[in-house]
Amino acid sequence: MNLLPCLAVGLKEIWAHKFRSLLTMLGIILGVSSLVAMTALVKGMENGMKENLIAMGGLDKVLLEDQQIPPYQQQYADDAVGRTINDVYALRASAPLIRLVSPEMALRGATVSYGDNSVTPSELDGVWSAALDMNLHVLQYGRFFTPLDEQRANSVCVIGTGIRDELFGSPEDLGREIVPLGRIVLINGQPFTIVGMFEHYESERERKAREWAKAHPQPKTNHGVARSRGWGRHGGWAFWRKNYTVYIPLNTMWIRFRSAAGTNNIPDPHLTDIDLKVRDLDQLETSLQQARNVLMITHHGIEDFMFQTQENNVENINAAIHNARMSGGIIAAIGLIVGGIGIMNIMLASITERVREIGIRKAIGATYADVFIQILIESVVIAVIGGLAGLGTSYGMVQALSILSPNENTPQITMPAMLIAFAFSAGVGVLAGLIPAFKAAKLDPIQALRYE
Amino acid sequence: MPLVELRGVSKIYHLGGEEIRALDDVNLDIDAGEFISIIGPSGSGKSTLMHILGCLDTPTRGTICLDGTLIHNATPRQLAAIRNRKIGFVFQFFNLLPKLNVLQNVELPMVYSGLSSRERRERALRALRMVDMENRSKHRPMQLSGGQQQRAAIARALVNDPKIIFADEPTGNLDSHTGEVILELFRKLSHEGRTIALVTHDPEIAAVTPRRIEIRDGRISKVIDPKLAGLDRQLETPASV
């Protein structure tokens, strides 16, 4: 017996019991759609995390951080120099595997003001021009710092769009872009000229939301003073941080804000951050060993520093994704198995109803295999139709989940997830059909024909 | 050589340690083209005999040769193929599938013998024409009278051009007039050269066949055979007497 008539019989059987078949399929539909939706949700999370990772400077960025002096070097604690500009020069001179070294000196809790408006930047850093490449900033307007700015400690600054929005108004509110180049703002009371502005950084979801809002203008409601609502509503923390950055030349930072401060009138020469980028990510270990060798000289052999690579972050992200996928996948798989049990149950009921039919089919020449395949195909057809319907439903489910779920990453339905879910549903159909098919196939035709 | 040849066939069931001989050492030949009836009261073993002849069951002992093939120890798969190609069944309760229409019911045996859908259709229509049911081919069994259902069932039995047709109480579920019509149809088919075995408990129905075999307690108790009485020539050519 070829497969086509079997398929027709299966479909007819399903059609003859529409409601029963629908209920049976529901288990598979829900199982498949929850599997796909769950994967989509995790994929959205993954996308968000990766986006954040890149917003923070990309994979090849390595942070040089302070570390507790190891116990066997405790006696040298007073000689520990910490991270200074000497490290930067030494790395630039002697570590060819390090492509980029970016020193940063931060001023915490600074206030930037213009007229009546003021804002506290997420970070106010004195940097070299290397910071542009290091933190993957894109300068949209104006210029970045020149060697002359650095040398003469010019009072210039480059700002993110968030700072612009707070001090001069955002394009969303004003309806036009403001480029405040040449304006003079006060940083902790000292005048600085804005010479450049970064582009607006945003996550994929934020961009879509903004474009949607643009395409569907809402009547503006005015509820008192507009105020900053933090980064929670604006998408990722990493993007918020980037948009609220103010950079000034490193030397300016040192002369204007650091040299006069510090305990006992001794200014603090330590850098807040030294960020590195390696030339070749494949040679990360070697590159870091080279940097370590250089730094061991500048630090007089005292290991008061460590490297923090993004690989750790990537590993963490991957672990988190893996866990989310596993737990969600197992729950969805249990859903599918429950659906499969539903199919098995209904198939068993169905063959009990059809003992006589099976007897007739056997009497006129159906073999064991014919009956087995017929019942198996009916079960698989239910599962496959359920699986296809589930794929359709998963789209709606993803929409529902993206409204309900607290994280701000758009769920993304992936092709492999759909294929796996569909294959799984078909597999469940086969497994669920095996026992009923076996029971039906081994019916004795004489007994079956007598069955009332 | 006869079409069907049974030699020393026994069927023994064990029920609670007790041995029940449903068939006990039965010898029987059926020639091609014969119209034969198997008579016996219920419990006599005639159904068992028909099941064994119809390849639905295998004997405990003895040999069966159908159309030159020994089938008493065939595998279930081989038996299914024999039932499909060489045997046609007509049942008391018609046993049409209620979800299929008449044409599909008649096509069903050919589905299992793997014919193309066009050939299936052609042959099914031809078989329906033989039983004069062509105009009912799109009806469901439930929409037909008992006699029509039985004719559709006969068409199904004929469709694979079997060597032998077994009819198990084919008139048992019909009123006497319709039963007559069905018996007439069998007689017509017999005249066309088909081998038909009628299984019944009713001697009146069995009377339509030239040869009658009576089963009692699992044994052939009586054979009425016009050949043995020298009557066959007379039956075939009554004008010569």
Image (cartoon, grey):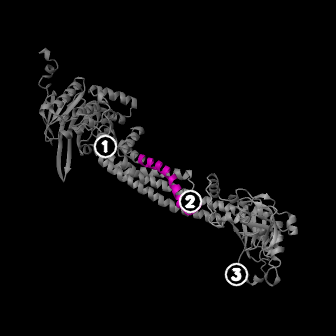
What amino acid is found at the position of numbered circle 3 in the picture? Pro
Please name which of the two marks, 1 or 2, marks the residue nearer to the observer.
Answer: 2
- What amino acid is labelled 1 in the image? Ile
Q: Chain of mark 3?
A: A
In primary-sequence order, the first of circles 3 and 2 is 2
Q: CA distance from mark 3 to mark 2?
A: 42 Å
Q: Chain of mark 2?
A: A
Q: Are marks 3 and 2 in contact (CB under 8 Å)?
A: no
Span colored in magenta: A381-408
Whether residue A90 appears in this view of the structure is no
Q: Which residue appears at 86% of the width and 69% of the height? A: A153
Q: Is A398 part of what is drawn in magenta?
A: yes
Q: CA distance from mark 1 to mark 2?
A: 47 Å
What's the residue type where badge 2 is placed? Val
| Label 3 close to label 1 by CB (< 8 Å) | no
Evaluate whether label 3 is on the same chain as label 2: yes
In this view of the protein, which residue sits in the foreground, A199 or A411? A199
For the stretch drawn in magenta, the main secondary structure is: helix
Chain under disc 1: A
The residue indicated by pointer 1 is A358
- Mark 3, residue position: A71
Q: Is residue A263 visible?
A: yes
Instruction: Kindly identify the residue that appears in the image at 12 percent across and 33 percent down.
Output: B203
Q: Callout 3: helix, strand or loop?
A: helix
Label 2 sits on residue: A42
Is the N terminus of chain B in the top left, top right, bottom left or bottom right quadrant? top left
